[in-house]
Image (cartoon, coloured by chain):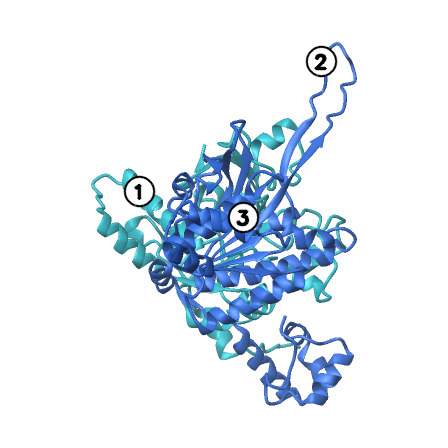
Chain colours: A cyan, B blue
Amino acid sequence: MMDYQIKAESGRQLLARLSTRPGLGGLDERLLGPAGPLPHDVIEITGEPSVGKSVLALQWVARAILSPPRGGLGVEVLLIDADHHQPLFVLVRLLQSCMKAFMSKTPGLRLNSSLVETSIKDALKRLTIVSVYDSTNLYTALLGLDMMLLSKPQMSMVVIDSLPAFYWSDRLSGGLPHMDSYLKRLLTVLQNSTKQHKVTVVFTRPSHFQSAVPSRFRSKDDTVGSTRLITLSRVDDANTGESSKGSGTSLPRQNCQSTFCAVIRSAYGQSSHKYLINKDGLTWL
Amino acid sequence: MAKLSTSMCQVLTKTAIENLGQRKIFTVVDVLQEDPKKLASISKLDFKDILTLRQALVSNYTPFPRQGLDAYNELMSNCSYIPTGIQKLDELLGGGFLTGNVFEICGLSGSGKTQLCLTVAANVALQMKKVVHLIDTKLDVSGKRIHSIIEGRESDEEVIGNTMEKILVTRVNNFYELYSFLYHLKNQLVREPGSVRLIVIESLPAVFLQYMGNYKMDSLGLLNNLASLVKYIAHEHYVSILIINLASIWVEEESAPLNDDSQMEPPVPHVDVKALLGKYWAHVPNTRLYIEQNGVPNGRKVTVMKSTHLALGSSCIVSITSDGVR
């Protein structure tokens, strides 16, 4: 006799399972491949301060929310902002440069400034921002994601700028000892509320947010549960062999136009790309 | 972190809170992390009530989502530059201190950090006729100095008096006083929106270095709380916050080469200038300016060290005169 197991499914799960969210193909061919990030991918961006973690994440947001005739994908994005580094100003600049780049590639497309402005406004309508100021906020925002995603079927990407932003104050009130297990816990909550929805999650993590001693929760590589890890670093640090420790607090010396390097690790292999940071965002070399 | 209280949800009784407290469940996050069945047995509430409680906590504490365009329009109509009144610095900053941002000025001692922020406070009070909060942690802000800076720009005694009244100096002795004063300002801003546009914290390390030694972990927690509060004030109420930090010189001796023939030059010690308060804090301000002597008497060089909206490494030269920084 065969055992028939009947799997019960709530209406909400059914809706989530059947719904198709717009894909993110072509989001960033260089880093994420031509197919783009897949649903359920968790992309982690890590690095020292001022290497462009937030800029890279916002560059993806800009590309995602721009409408297709302007060179974007036209999907909705949720941005959970815990670091408050004026993401909107940066985003608007990135939207402009994204359109500029698209215009130079497309012969015959002319955008005057008023068209650019309406396109930006149109793109921003696809963005939802949640500002969080303490860990209770962040935690409930992650738990509430489930409902939010259900109500927005066009949303394909969730970006969290600095997931461990409140680690130290949580720790003060008697939290967990290990940074890795702390991150893991937040990620578990995040994945629980997004697993039924076909969305890609992107989060940033300052590189010092990692346990000095590997905790038992730590997997072999240094990802904390993400499927793709992008490590950003200054190239000149690596050349001189100087440890990158505390380079964020040091002053930029004469060579302030430094080059950077992004290393992408995922199940598909590893690759590295050099880039510069300017007002158009990350420019690949 | 929000502690549990009976006002949060009808089903949450005093005894339930006590029961939960015995198992070290004190905060909203603690409840949300725990398994609902376990919570029901600990608190001796109905399982159904626990689910109601969870729902209420999530919906009450979830931050309000905003559509990108609304947020952008609001930002555009409320955001402005606060001119510092120092022409070259304004040019460097693209117009002045951008509201909604946290700025840090760091420099070695004697580099003119205090002079710079007193001048900015005086200029803002004089030109914009707005209240400036100056939080003095070292108990050494000189009213006379502010007066002489204003005198250098304005001769009318009445205007000088009015301007002096707009610069509100608050002395704080320790970190907790600083935190509670900022909290008070936050509440004041909720009552009277727009009443404050610039807050200057004259030296954060002065109240903070005492925590940096043995209790390093706790100190980061305090700093994290302060950062959250400061960002909340700046971001939600469009206030510019200027924080003074110290810089220190680090000398790292390079190890001597093993064979003498290959390398003729003696090892050069690596000198590095770093802002204090550590790696966590390094990430907090939106913009960090570094002020240093540039060899010319009274001349100072101001460099952008870190910024979300300015070009890194750009700089300007200002000079310190008897009536403030020009």
Q: Please report the residue visible at 64 percent of the width from the left and 72 percent of the height from the top.
A: B29
Q: Secondary structure at mark 2?
A: loop
CA gap, disc 3 to disc 2? 41 Å
Q: Position of residue B88 (x, y in %)?
A: 40, 38
Q: Position of residue B258 (x, y in %)?
A: 79, 18
What mark, if any, has residue A100 been given in the picture? 1
User: Which residue corresponds to mark 3?
Assistant: B104
Label 3 in the same subunit as label 2: yes
Q: Which residue type carries mark 2?
A: Gln
Label 1 in the same subunit as label 3: no
Q: Which residue type carries mark 3?
A: Glu
User: Which residue corresponds to mark 2?
Assistant: B263
Label 1 in the same subunit as label 2: no
Q: Secondary structure at mark 3?
A: strand
**Mark 2, other Cα within 10 Å: few <14 / some 14–19 / many ≥20:** few
Asked whether, in this view, residue B107 is left or right of residue A283, the answer is right
Q: Position of residue A211 (x, y in %)?
A: 72, 51
- Front of the two marks 1 and 2: 2
